[in-house]
Amino acid sequence: MYDTLDIGLLVSHLRETHHGPLFVVGFSMGAAKLTNFLGRTKTKSNVDGACCICCPWDFTENNSAVHKPNFVERCYHFIITNAVKLWVALHYSALSKNKRLKKKSPAFRRTRSGLLWWMGTHDMVSFDNTFTINWLGYDNVHEYYEAASPHNQLPNVTTPLLIINSRNDPLIPNVVNPGPEIMKDLPNAVAIECEYGGHIGFWTPFRGDWTAQCVISFIQQPHLNQRNLSKARSKTGIRRKNSQQIAQMLRVTSKTGLNDYKGIERM
C-alpha cells in the first residue's frame, strides 16, 4: 500500500499521449494508495485532481476493523486474505526468487509450518506479519502499518483533492476519518463525512450513485481544466521531465527498498 510505483507508471503512460486534464479516483484500498502517491510526489504528481472514496486512513491500532475485527469485518478479512494467498500461489515461482522472502516467510517452507500457514492464515494482520513485512523489509507489522497509513501523507498533498467517507462504514471506523483540525491546514482539499453510506454504498433511490455525481461536479471546476497546462504537456521534453520527477519523488521517499523506477523514467 505504501509503494505506489504502479500508479506512477500508469500516470506517466497516460501522459505519453494525453496532454489534457487528468483526474484519478480511488476507492477503499485504492484511495489509500492514491493518497500515498499524491503525498509522496507532492507538486510533481502530474495529476490535475483526485478523489478518495471510503479511504481507510489509519491501519494502526487506532483502526479496530484491522486489529479487533467483529464478525462482518472477519468475513472481509477472510475474503481478502484468501484472494491475496491465491495471488501468491499464482506467482509462487517468481516470488520464491526473492531471497529475503523465501528465507523468512513460512509460505515457502515445505514443512509443517508452511502447511499450517497456507491452511490457517485467514486475516490480513497475520498475512502481513508473516509475508508482507518480509517482502518489503520492515521489522514488524506495526512499522509497516504506520508507514502505509495514508493519514501520514495527507498533509503533503498539494493536488486538489475531494474526500468522501461515511460514519456508518462497517469496515472503516469513523474515528480515523480526517477531521476539521486536519482539513483546516489543507487549502486544496475538501472532506465530506456522511452520516450514512456504508462502504462505497452511497446510492440514492432512483438517482444512482451520489458519489459519482459529486466527483463529476468536482472535476468540472474551471480551475482544474487549464488549457495552458495541456499546451505545455504536448512537448516531449516537458512530458519526459514530468515522468522523471515522479520517479525521483518516489525514490527519495521510498521506505521499502523497491527502487526500480526506471520504467517511469523512460517514458
Image: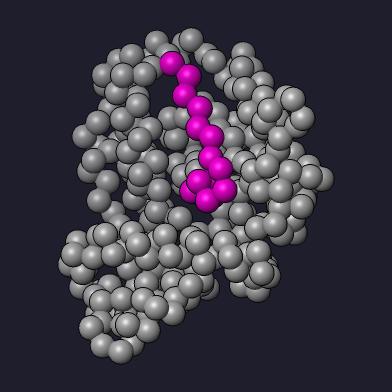
Left or right? Give the position of 149 relative to 229. Answer: right
23 is higher (above) or lower (below) than 227 = below
Instruction: Tell me the residue at 54%/65% (across/down).
Output: 77
What residue sits 35% from the left and 35% below the top? 10
Q: How many marks?
A: 0
One can see residue 131 in this view: yes
**On the image, which quarter does residue 159 sit in?**
top right
Residue 98 versus residue 46 in the image, above or below: below
Magenta part of the chain: 20-33
Q: Is residue 83 left or right of residue 94?
A: right
Residue beneath the point at 65% across and 74% down: 68
Q: Can residue 218 be seen here?
A: no
Q: Position of residue 170 (x, y in %)?
A: 70, 57
Q: Is 71 on the left or on the right of 175, as rendered?
A: left
Image coordinates for residue 36, horizontal then vertical, percent: 50, 49
In the image as oriented, which residue stretches furthest toward the bottom? 112
Q: Quadrant of residue 223?
A: top right
Residue furthest front in the image? 206
In the rendered image, residue 145, in percent from the top left (x then y), is placed at 52, 66
Q: Quadrant of the C terminus?
A: top left
Task: Judge whether residue 198 is colored magenta.
Answer: no
